[in-house]
Image (cartoon, rainbow, N blue to C red):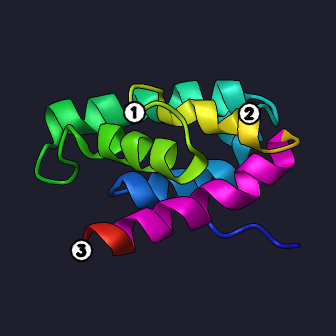
Amino acid sequence: MSKPPYSKPANLEELIKQVCARPQMFAGKDNFDLAAAFINGYYFALSEFRPEMNPPSRLNDFGRWLAQQFGYPRNYSWMYFRTALPDDESVFAQLPLLYEKFSKSAE
């Protein structure tokens, strides 16, 4: 399977898609915990320095939506959904799809 070309992510959806497509490039290895830490850090920087591109609460809203989808308490981090899937490969495949579904439901 060919990887999509890299371009600087302009928003959270692009960031999630790119990190999940190439976790080794962003996190050093195919590890969801490391990739999630990268997403959190990059998103924090975007929300601080480019808030017009990413509302600061967007990742938190996604976390609350994921918690609802998987039956977790609302205060669980978006990263906790990892426990619902068997392995990191499944997480990397599902996370962009889940974020897309969240975005459509938030419109």
Other-residue count near label 3 (Cα within 10 Å), few / some / many at <14 / 14–19 / ≥20: few
Residue 56 place in picture, x, y as percent = 20, 38
Q: Would residue 7 be visible to someone looking at this image? A: no
C-alpha separation, residue under disc 3 versus residue under disc 1: 20 Å
The residue that mark 2 highlights is 83
Query: In the figure, residue 88 lies in which quadrant?
Result: top right
Which sits in the foreground, 106 or 54?
106
The Cα atoms of the two marked residues, 1 and 2, are separated by: 15 Å
Residue 71 locus on image (x, y percent):
56, 43
Circles 1 and 2, Cβ within 8 Å, touching? The answer is no
Residue 74: image x %, image y %?
40, 33
- Magenta stretch, main secondary structure, is helix
Q: Quadrant of the C terminus?
A: bottom left
3 vs 1, front mark: 1
Q: Residue at x 67, y 25 (%)?
A: 34
Q: Secondary structure at mark 1?
A: loop
Instruction: Please give the range of residues in magenta.
Output: 88-103
Question: Mark 1: which amino acid?
Answer: Arg
**Location of residue 89 with respect to 17 vertically, above or below:** above
For label 2, the SS is helix
Which class describes the residues within 10 Å of circle 1: few (<14), some (14-19), or many (20+)? some
Helix, strand or loop at label 3? It is loop
- Label 1: which residue? 74
Sequence-first disc among 3 and 1: 1
Q: Residue at x 87, y 41 (%)?
A: 87
